[in-house]
Amino acid sequence: MIRTQVVIAGAGPVGTVAAYFLAQQGIDVLVLEAGADCALDLRASTFHPPTLEMLDTLGITPFLLERGLKAPVYHYRDRGTGDVIDFDLGELHDVTRYPFRLQCEQYHLARALAERLDQHPKASVRFGHRLVSVAQDETGVDLVVETPFAIERVRADWLIGADGAGSTVRKWLGVGFEGFTYPEKFLCLSTTEPLEDYLPNLAYVNYVADPAEWLVLLRVPSVWRILLPADPDSSDSELVSDANRDRVFKHLIGKTGVPTQHRTIYRMHQRVAERFRQGRAMLVGDSAHLNNPLGGFGMNSGIHDAFNLCQRLVRIINGTEDEASLDQFDRQRRGAARSFIQAQTIQTMEMMKQGLAAGQDRRREELLRTRADPELRRQFLLRQAMFQSLRDAEAIA
Ligand SMILES: O=C(O)CCc1cccc(O)c1
């Protein structure tokens, strides 16, 4: 039987951040990851300013800055009218030392932290270790883990479920995951084609609204990523076919035969777990909440969960804080997920679908008014950069 203070299920960005935070504070931590390595998930690739500040306390932000692209400016574009409404996070220079989004694939973070954890005297990371069952009593949790060659038992004081959308921890806790799944599919293409040569004045982050076919054009260090809704009447193989690729790029840059590095079909979900804490087990990141990727809030809010939780857990383990603090973690982070992340991402999806110029130009006028008014613009930037959701959550008693 393995004995440790904290087990973390999942070695993605959120699980590794939680583990490294705890290990740095002198807590024994064991990370269990079913996969053979940190997942090479391309979905999350934006680090927002408060996340960079948090990660800086772990000493990992300089590593990310070296690999990523700084994106202070982002565009809301309307394909129909050609309008571009730009916002500049540089205006938040008095609020943060990182007044930009950092475009950097998330696996860089998870892999770098997994390597550091591997060298850490307080931490252990086990790949190929699949969590099979979870039980708990008043003093700890009992886990059964399947390894490549054996079934092992682990006893820990605390369990953190950072094991993604299909979380085994959440299922064993019997915690509901209410919300909805978008009926449509989405297509993500990545290409090394220099889109900026065809679309002048392109920012690194562009939300292109269009009632016929909206797009997100997102630059990450290695490629341009293009996210768009997929034709519901087409099969997955048709959607990832050369013919569909040619249709998308013809419409976008007037060119066919553009090389792509990935063509992926996504389903998107808007769901929040009914509890983020049950006794000695807590849920963070995708195991606790899922949202569409518009705005790049998913991984960031997961890292915010991990910091909120682990700061409390260290104090509880060291005997300076009552366990009731974990209920406040639940209220604060569930509050952020429901009131901000869900609301904002659902609203952005609606805007993208309808086009900025749809209806009575209401959304377009609202964005233009926000852009023109210094106070509204600042509030908007604070929301988009996720400062506001953190402040609102921290105000929850
Ligand atoms: O809004 C963002 O920052 C991310 C949007 C996006 C773009 C391309 C692919 C993807 O999965 C998400």
Image (cartoon, helix red, strand yellow):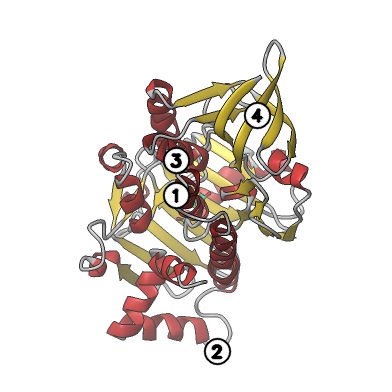
The residue lying at 75 percent from left, 46 percent from top is 173
Tag on residue 315? 1
**Amino acid of disc 4:** Arg
**Amino acid of disc 2:** Gln
The residue lying at 55 percent from left, 63 percent from top is 328
Category of crowding for the residue at label 3, using alpha-carbon neighbours closer than 10 angstroms: few (below 14), some (14–19), many (at least 20): many
**Taking the image as drawn, is residue 167 in sight?**
no
Q: Nearer the viewer, mark 1 or mark 2?
A: 1
Q: Pinpoint residue 269: horizontal percent, then vertical percent.
A: 67, 56
- Identify the mark nearer the N-term, 2 or 4: 4
Q: Which residue is mark 3?
A: 17
Q: Pinpoint residue 324: horizontal percent, then vertical percent.
A: 58, 59
- Identify the mark nearer the N-term, 3 or 1: 3
- Tell whether circle 2 marks a residue whose Cβ is less than 8 angstroms from ligand 1: no
Q: Pinpoint residue 358: horizontal percent, then vertical percent.
A: 56, 80
Q: Quadrant of the N terminus?
A: top right
CB within 8 Å, label 3 to label 4 = no
Q: Pinpoint residue 53: horizontal percent, then vertical percent.
A: 31, 53
Q: Mark 1 falls on what kind of element?
A: helix
**Amino acid of disc 1:** Arg
**Amino acid of disc 3:** Val
In 3D space, how far apart are the residues under numbered discs 2 and 3 (Cα atoms)?
45 Å
CB within 8 Å, label 1 to label 4 = no
